[in-house]
Image (spheres, rainbow, N blue to C red):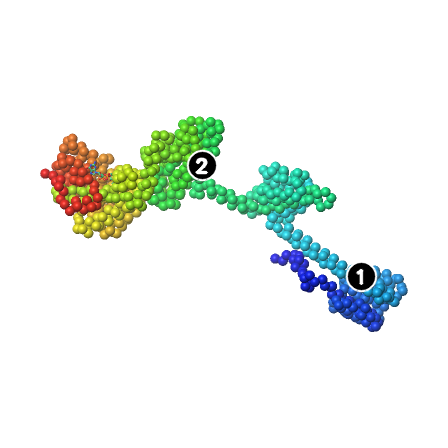
């Protein structure tokens, strides 16, 4: 883009810097007397002067048409006309040469005529050389001054043009106000930025453009008398958009950063006569700042306040409650079985569920309450003003009720439930951390006692909770540190007098607590979502061990492996089990998986189908605690298992009476369905005898061996058990 006025600013003077050179001067002599022309050239000669000379008006014009001169010495009387003709030509051509008329004429009219036509001086013949020289010096001096003036004028014009261009095409709003705060100038940017014609704004107060909310703030700054001369200010404010004007921007206002500089009178006493202002549109920057700030304080998925903002609001609410001696409640809300959805249907469905739950939860709250998402499936609620604990209870019931209707996910409906823990200020703590932690502990208790409910914090829960958290933390590292170990317990066939199977039983060698039984940590692993990793480790370790035993010749021993009901929540559980067996080169028939009877009763994860697939792959499936639940024959048809394990509780009853109708029934069912039967928890010889009498041949229990290491198990495989029955 060409910038007006650029060239004049680039002009540089020629000549070596610091060297004061007299400028070159060109003089034209027009006189019909050749000897005079020679004299002029001689007496006026200087190193920097160049002369041309001719004797007629026509030749003079010819020279002048070729180039410009600084001075013309013009004879009045010439053969082809008077010097006036040449003067007229100069005027006509807008020429700027200085002219000295030289004539013998005594006529005053001739002199006046020449001066009127623009001649600068008049020398009458005969003249003294010195007089001519003075006239020439003076005319040249005057011409030089005029030339410098013209150059200066041109530079000023160019400069003015450039400044006007810069101001008028500035992307910022530039304006001046008079002493009364009214526009005295505003650049055309106002049209584009705010949709106002600049003509319409002239003499109108600046506040015409300011959004009403910001007027008071800016008025103080604009009250000029109070502004110290030279004191500038910067302020952010919103300028009004002319809504009558069509605009690509929908906003009512434009946020600008305004810099105001008082204009000081240059004459007389220094006083403020107006204000010079530059307003820069910072709407985009503001929007970006708002987005960044929103992201810093909100959860991206649900757009609810995040942990930081929740803590902030809770601290504020505590301070306010302290002042008015009031009460508030904090709820910790955890979505039940969320991991199931995430693992089974994928993260997109999980996100959909979380968004739907967020919307349901907030529908149960009032304005002024805060619902936040801490991350994962954890939400918190702040009820900043409650009168009694029952108020929090009412809201908790309401929240539970909002989830009554199933949530539509793309892969089907999901009936979401939540576990809610409640802590009250001041009863359960007076800091944001304590209240949130205590609500979390209460929520944990709800989870442990069956989920889908709410509970208030009870200080007695605290110690237990601490131990539990410590256990959880340790469990997270147990796998990495190699603290898990498999023990094995033999399953004996009394008729064959040998170990026909082994059950793999998990142990945790805790560095401080010693050997931790699975009943103490498996439920924790299930709750914190570690069970998947642990089960994979168990399966892999047990299969690797069986492969070793096979290599030692034990090719007909069956290995029972316990699986958690949670493992069956995974779509690809069957594929991973089959994959693990083939990876270790095991025949499917040598492995049996133990599932619990309760899993058959709640078939939400399609356990029946998975059991069928495992059986089709040739893998055995045993029902672990058979008889303890509502075992029904219908289940056995639906779940094509291979083995029933009679629960320990029935074996214990054999101590009282050596017959038991339930055991008789179970053995009958097993025979009817062609299932293998194993009695577990056999501790005494009498129990073994009674079981044998009832038709049960395979047994497992302390009578034969307590669970032992892989090394001990290998020894059992090699020997016939000593505790044979009579
Ligand atoms: N998901 C997984 N669960 C597992 C795994 N390993 C074990 N478990 C389950 O933990 C429960 C407790 O197991 P454990 O403490 O190992 O107890 C087993 C035996 O030690 C015990 N037992 C065996 N004989 C007797 C006996 O004569 N008396 C008596 N009081 N107890 C005895 O019984 C448990 C074996 O039970 P079961 O599995 O039902 O056959 C238990 O429910 C295990 O299933 C694992 O790797 N994953």
As helix, strand or loop, the secondary structure at mark 1 comes to helix
As helix, strand or loop, the secondary structure at mark 2 comes to helix
Q: Nearer the viewer, residue 123 or 356?
A: 123
- Ligand 1 shows up in the quarter that is top left
In the picture as drawn, the residue positioned furthest to the bottom comes out as 34
* Quadrant (top left/top right/bottom left/bottom right) for the N terminus: bottom right
Q: Earlier in the sequence, mark 2 or mark 1?
A: 1
551 sits to left or right of 340: left
Against 31, residue 670 (above or below) is: above
Q: Which residue is mark 2?
A: 311
Q: Are marks 2 and 1 in contact (CB under 8 Å)?
A: no
**Is residue 476 among the parts visible in the rendering?**
yes
Sort mark 2 into few (<14), some (14-19) or many (20+) by Cα contacts within 10 Å. some
Q: Which residue is mark 1?
A: 138
Nearer to us of marks 2 and 1 is 1
Q: Residue at x 81, y 64 (%)?
A: 136
64 sits to left or right of 364: right
Q: Nearer the viewer, residue 104 or 556?
A: 104
265 sits to left or right of 99: left
How far across and how far down the image is residue 166, in percent?
Answer: 64, 52
Against 341, residue 52 (above or below) is: below
């Amino acid at each position: 883009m060409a910038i007006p006025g650029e060239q004049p600013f680039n002009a540089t003077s020629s000549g070596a810097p610091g060297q004061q050179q007299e400028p070159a001067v060109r003089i034209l002599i027009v006189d019909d007397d050749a000897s005079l022309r020679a004299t002029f050239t001689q007496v006026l000669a200087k190193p920097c002067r160049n002369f041309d000379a001719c004797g007629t008006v026509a030749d003079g014009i010819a020279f002048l048409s070729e180039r410009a001169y600084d001075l013309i010495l013009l004879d009045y009387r010439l053969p082809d006309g008077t010097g006036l003709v040449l003067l007229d030509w100069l005027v006509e051509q807008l020429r700027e040469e200085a002219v000295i008329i030289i004539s013998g004429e005594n006529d005053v009219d001739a002199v006046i005529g020449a001066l009127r036509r623009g001649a600068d001086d008049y020398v009458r013949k005969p003249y003294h050389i010195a007089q001519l020289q003075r006239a020439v010096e003076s005319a040249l001096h005057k011409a030089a001054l005029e030339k410098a003036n013209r150059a200066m004028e041109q530079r000023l014009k160019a400069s003015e043009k450039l400044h006007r261009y810069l101001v008028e095409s500035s992307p910022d709003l530039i304006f001046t106000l008079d002493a009364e705060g009214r526009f005295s100038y505003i650049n055309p940017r106002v049209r584009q930025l705010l949709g106002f014609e600049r003509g319409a704004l002239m003499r109108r107060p600046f506040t015409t453009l300011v959004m009403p909310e910001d007027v008071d703030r800016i008025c103080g700054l604009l009250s000029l008398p109070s502004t110290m001369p030279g004191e500038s200010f910067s302020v952010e404010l919103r300028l009004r958009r002319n809504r009558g004007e069509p605009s690509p921007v929908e906003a009512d206002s434009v946020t600008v950063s305004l810099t105001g500089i008082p204009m000081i009178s240059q004459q007389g006493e220094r006083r403020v006569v107006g204000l010079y202002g530059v307003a820069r549109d910072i709407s985009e920057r503001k929007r970006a700042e708002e987005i960044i700030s929103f992201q810093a304080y909100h959860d991206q998925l649900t757009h609810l306040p995040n942990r930081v903002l929740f803590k902030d609001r809770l601290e504020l609410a505590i301070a306010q409650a302290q002042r008015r001696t009031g009460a508030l409640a904090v709820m910790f809300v955890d979505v039940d079985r969320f991991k199931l959805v995430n693992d089974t249907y994928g993260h997109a469905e999980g996100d959909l569920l979380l968004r739907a739950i967020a919307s349901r939860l907030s529908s149960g709250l009032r304005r002024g309450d805060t619902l936040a998402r801490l991350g994962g499936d954890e939400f918190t609620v702040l009820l900043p003003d409650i009168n009694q604990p029952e108020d929090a209870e009412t809201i908790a019931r309401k929240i539970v009720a909002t989830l009554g209707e199933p949530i539509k996910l793309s892969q089907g409906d999901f009936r979401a439930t939540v576990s809610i823990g409640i802590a009250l200020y001041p009863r359960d703590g007076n800091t944001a951390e304590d209240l949130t932690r205590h609500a979390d502990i209460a929520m944990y208790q709800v989870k442990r006692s069956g989920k889908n409910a709410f509970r208030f914090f009870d200080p007695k829960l605290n110690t237990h909770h601490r131990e539990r958290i410590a256990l959880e933390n340790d469990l997270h590292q147990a796998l990495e540190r190699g603290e898990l170990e498999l023990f094995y317990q033999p399953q004996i066939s009394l008729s064959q007098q040998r170990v026909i199977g082994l059950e793999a039983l998990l142990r945790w060698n805790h560095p401080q607590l010693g050997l931790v039984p699975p009943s103490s940590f498996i439920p924790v692993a299930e709750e914190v979502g570690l069970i998947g990793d642990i089960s994979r480790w168990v399966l892999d370790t047990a299969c690797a061990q069986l492969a070793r035993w096979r290599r030692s010749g034990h090719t007909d021993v069956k290995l029972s492996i316990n699986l958690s009901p949670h493992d069956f929540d995974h779509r690809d559980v069957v594929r991973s089990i089959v994959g693990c067996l083939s990876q270790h080169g095991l025949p499917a028939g040598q492995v049996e998986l133990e599932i619990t009877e309760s899993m058959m009763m709640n078939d939400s994860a399609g356990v029946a189908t998975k059991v069928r697939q495992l059986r089709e792959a040739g893998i055995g499936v045993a029902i672990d605690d058979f008889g303890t639940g509502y075992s029904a024959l219908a289940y056995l048809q639906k779940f094509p298992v291979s083995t029933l394990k009679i629960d320990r509780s029935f074996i214990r009853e054999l101590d009282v009476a050596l017959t038991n109708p339930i055991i008789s029934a179970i053995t009958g069912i097993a025979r009817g369905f062609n299932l293998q039967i194993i009695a577990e928890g056999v501790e005494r010889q009498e129990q073994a005898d009674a079981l044998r009498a009832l038709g049960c041949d395979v047994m497992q229990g302390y009578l034969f061996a307590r669970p032992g290491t892989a090394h001990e198990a290998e020894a059992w495989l090699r020997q016939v058990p000593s505790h044979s029955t009579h």
